[in-house]
Image (cartoon, rainbow, N blue to C red):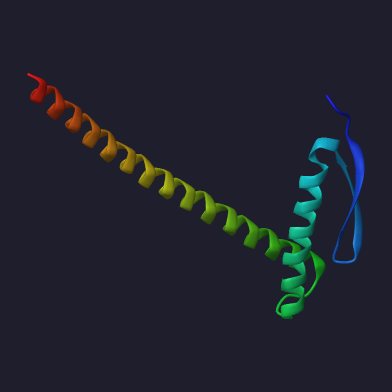
Amino acid sequence: MSSAKAVSIRILDKEYRVACSPDEQEALLASANYLGKKMKEIRDSGKVIGTDRIAVMAALNIAHELIKSQSESVSQGDAMSNRIRTLQSKIDAALHDTKQMDL
């Protein structure tokens, strides 16, 4: 098991040090970049003032994206399951018809 190491990330011109295992460092940096981009978009819109409020709005937007993505994944999974069941039924019917022809 790898040990955690402090990694520096920069969000809205402020540096943070976060403990992170080496195998998760790339994901942490990508997450920090994504968060920084979202916070910059909110700050630059001029509708929200204050780093704390910008961070909360970014967190809400990201949580919304996650929930929407999860919901879409479930819907796609359900559609795929239905399609597989339909194909399985067609295969079963074709096999049954083939067995009937052999008789």
Q: Quadrant of residue 54?
A: bottom right
**Whole-percent x and y of residue 98?**
15, 27
**In front: 102, or 22?**
102
**In front: 17, or 50?**
17
Decide if residue 51 is on the left or right side of residue 14: left
Residue that lies at the very extreme toward the bottom in this rendered image? 46
Q: Is 48 placed above or below 53 here?
A: below
**Whole-percent x and y of residue 17?**
91, 49
Q: Quadrant of residue 90?
A: top left
Question: How many marks overall?
Answer: 0
Q: Quadrant of residue 46?
A: bottom right
Decide if residue 63 is on the left or right side of residue 21: left
Q: Is 77 placed above or below 52 here?
A: above
Decide if residue 12 is on the left or right side of residue 69: right
Decide if residue 43 is on the left or right side of residue 97: right
**Whole-percent x and y of residue 77?**
42, 44
Residue located 81% across and 36% down the image: 23
Residue located 72% across and 72% down the image: 42
Residue located 9% across and 25% down the image: 101
**In front: 85, or 6?**
85
> Which of the image's four quarters has the N terminus?
top right
**In front: 13, or 81?**
81
Residue that lies at the very extreme toward the top in this rendered image? 103
**Whole-percent x and y of residue 32?**
79, 55
Residue that lies at the very extreme toward the front in this rendered image? 102
> Which of the image's four quarters has the C terminus?
top left
Residue located 27% across and 34% down the image: 88
Residue that lies at the very extreme toward the left in this rendered image? 103
